[in-house]
Image (cartoon, rainbow, N blue to C red):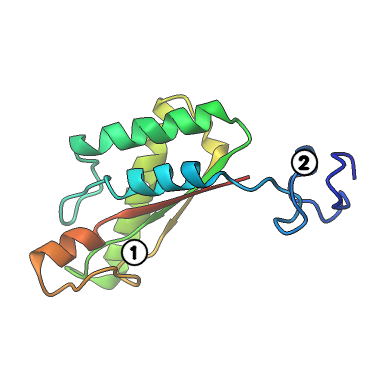
Amino acid sequence: DSDKDGVDDEKDKCPSIPGTVANNGCPEVKKEITEKVSYAARRVYFNTASYQLRTVSYKGLNEVADILKSDPDLKLTVEGHTDNVGIADKNKILSLQRAYAVKEYLVKRGIKADRITIAGYGEEQPVASNNTPEGRAQNRRVVMRVEY
C-alpha cells in the first residue's frame, strides 16, 4: 500500500494517490467538480446528423478543460448520443464522432489525449421523446464524467 490509503497496491486503481477503500483506492471526486462537468455537458450542442460542435458549446468545454488542468490526475469519460433520425448503425458512428469531437477540442485546449476516454451509444439511450424536435435536440448530446 504505497500511498497508505488502506488498499493494497494490487487492488488499488490509483496506487500513487491516497483514496478511499469504497472507491477502490482512488479519491472521491468533489461534488462541485462532478456537477460543473455535468452542467457543461448539457451545454454541448450538435445539429441533426452532425458531429461539429456548435459555437455555444465552447464556454462549457473550456470550463471542463480548466478543471482537468487544475488536477492532472483526473480522467474524463465522454459518451456521445444521437436522436433516432436516420439509420441506427450510422447513428452509432455519429455518436462516437461526437464524443471524439469533444475529446479533440479538449486536447487542443491542452489536455492529454490519454486522459480522455470516449464511447458512442447512438440512439440507444434517449433522455427525451424522439417524437418532437425539442426531444430530438435533447437526445443529440454528450455525457461527461470525471474520475480518478
At 74% from the left edge and 56% from the top edge, which residue is drawn?
A: 24
Say whether marks 1 and 2 touch (CB < 8 Å). Answer: no
Q: Is residue 26 found left or right of 86 in the rendered image?
A: right
Label 2: which residue?
Answer: 18
Q: Amino acid at mark 1?
A: Lys
Residue 35 picture location, percent across and down: 43, 47
Q: Quadrant of the N terminus?
A: top right
Disc number placed over residue 64 in the picture, else none: none
Residue 96 picture location, percent across and down: 37, 55
Q: Decide which of 117, 40 is in the foreground and name it.
A: 40
Residue 43, placed above or below residue 96 = above
Q: Assign a secondary structure to mark 1.
A: helix
At 88% from the left edge and 52% from the top edge, which residue is drawn?
A: 8
Label 1: which residue?
Answer: 92
Residue 118, placed above or below residue 33 = below
Q: CA distance from mark 1 to mark 2?
A: 38 Å
Q: Amino acid at mark 2?
A: Pro
Residue 135, placed above or below residue 42 = below
Q: Assign a secondary structure to mark 2.
A: loop
At 86% from the left edge and 48% from the top edge, which residue is drawn?
A: 9
Q: Quadrant of the C terminus?
A: top right
At 16% from the left edge and 66% from the top edge, which residue is drawn?
A: 135
The mark lying in front, picked from 1 and 2, is 2
List the single residue furthest toward the left: 133
Residue 138 picture location, percent across and down: 22, 60
